[in-house]
Image: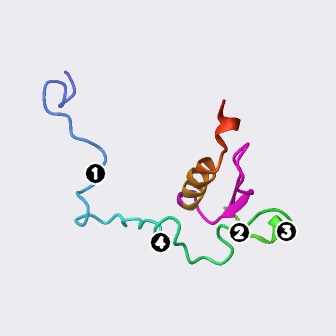
Amino acid sequence: MAAPSFNGRIKPATKRARAQGQGDLPRLGLHPEIPGACTTPRCGDAADGQDETALPAGWIRVGVQGSTDPDRVWCSGLCATWGIARAELRVPAAARR
């Protein structure tokens, strides 16, 4: 004899995630500050001459080749992305060729 669900409906073994605000899963917040206005101390400071081992884990050092903007350290990926865009705007036209 075949299994009871052979021709019947298959029941999922796991629960599906509910819509936001209805389930038990926490909703992760976004970075609290808008890019360029971060209030985290030392976020966006020049990385030259800075002891990077003293920074908290997860900080990002960003530098764009040919940019007049120095390498900087950022507290999050969102801030680092903003820093990359800012550094790219400071690449001289002669260096872009």
- Residue corresponding to mark 1: 15
Viewer-nearest of discs 1 and 3 = 3
Q: Which mark is residue 24?
A: none
Q: Nearer the viewer, mark 4 or mark 1?
A: 4
Distance CA(mark 1)–CA(mark 2): 46 Å
Question: Measured along the vertical axis of the image, is residue 33 above or below residue 69?
Answer: below
Give the residue number, with chain letter if any, for mark 2: 45
Residue 20 picture quarter: bottom left
9 left or right of 50 in image:
left
Please provide percent x and percent y for residue 3.
Answer: 22, 27
Q: Which residue is mark 3?
A: 51
Label 4 secondary element? loop
Task: Please rate how many residues cluster around mark 2, counting C-alpha atoms within 10 Å: few if below 14, some from 14 to 19, many from 20.
Answer: some
Q: Are marks 2 and 3 in contact (CB under 8 Å)?
A: no
Q: Quadrant of residue 9?
A: top left
Amino acid beneath label 4: Glu
Name the quarter where the C terminus is drawn: top right
Q: Which residue is mark 4?
A: 33
